[in-house]
Image (cartoon, grey):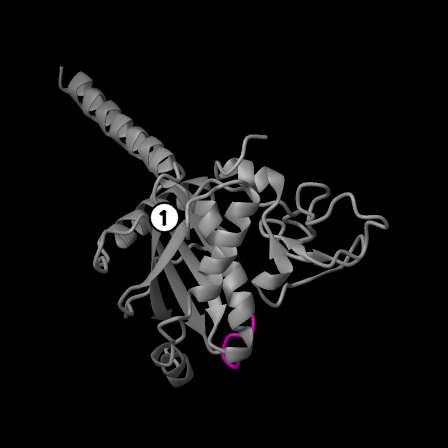
Amino acid sequence: MWRNLRILVLLLILLIVALNAYFDRVYSTDWNTPLRVAVYPINGDGSAEADQFIAGLQADRFENLEKFFDQEARHWGLTLERPVRFRAAPQLHSQPPALARNANMLGVVWWSLRMRYWAWQTPDPPGAPDVKLFVVYHNPALTPTLSHSVGMQKGLYGVVNVFAERSMIGSNDVITAHELLHTLGASDKYDPRTSQPLHPIGYADPSKQPLLPQTSAELMGGRIPQSATESETPESLRQVLIGPMTAAEIRWSKQ
């Protein structure tokens, strides 16, 4: 009897989690109202430089991100004005749970559960956000190579690793936009072994003749292909667009 009761409780918990994930998916991409995104800055390496950079963040720092999503949404026929609204959240002084580089499937699941709880218990800014992005700033002199950023649809949160460097603000915006779309169900469109965008879904202009070099990046392709083996990181959102497969995944269009 007790065994059956434990199984029933577990099944109910799994059902609640599944329903919660389903409704997160539906309501975050119904586009009846703007998506509310809270952005939490975090000093990723404890450096004074990262703290100074965070302290100097401007109130209008999300303007380019909002304009990008507004422009791309209109291209795909969405008439909602400013469909993505970013809001600054308080700086956090704790680090998100770290995912081990060699984590197996069980380790990833355990990390995901801890991360969801950590994201859930962070304080909300005024107006409950739909998505939480934790932007972790690193001093490039101390951390020349960033850990992989993640955006999770289950839980609607992202951990975005960026550089605390003014010259990198544009590329930081690209990473932020990329991870935000992961939380909305968009998939990567590059080869994880080489980081090269996949043709045609990861190319901004897959029918261009000659095909290479490209001049822009598809957001989920991540980079601007220059040759069959080389690609460049876009310097800002001005070099990026949202392609048809990505637009369909976030329900801006029907493919």
- Residue 64 x %, y %: 49, 64
Q: Is residue 247 above or below residue 220?
A: above
At a point 29% along the width and 34% down the height, the residue shown is 20
In-front residue for pair 73/43: 73
Q: Is residue 18 above or below residue 227?
A: above
- Residue 197 x %, y %: 68, 49
The C terminus, quarter of image: top right
The N terminus, quarter of image: top left
Q: Where does label 1 land, which residue?
A: 35
Extreme residue in the left direction = 1
At a point 52% along the width and 57% down the height, the residue shown is 68
Query: Can residue 143 be found in the magenta stretch?
Result: yes
Q: Give left or right: position of 192 versus 53.
A: right
The quadrant in which residue 244 appears is: top right
Extreme residue in the right direction = 210
Label 1 environment density (alpha carbons within 10 Å; few <14, some 14–19, many ≥20):
some
In-front residue for pair 25/141: 25
Q: Give left or right: position of 174 versus 61.
A: right
Query: Can residue 78 be found in the magenta stretch?
Result: no
- Residue 152 x %, y %: 41, 46
For numbered disc 1, what is the local secondary structure? strand
At a point 42% along the width and 54% down the height, the residue shown is 99
Amino acid type assigned to the residue bearing label 1 in the image: Leu
In-front residue for pair 45/218: 218
User: Secondary structure of the magenta portion, mostly?
Assistant: loop
Q: Give left or right: position of 53 versus 113.
A: right
Extreme residue in the top direction = 1
In-front residue for pair 70/210: 70
The span shown in magenta is 141-146
- Residue 239 x %, y %: 64, 61
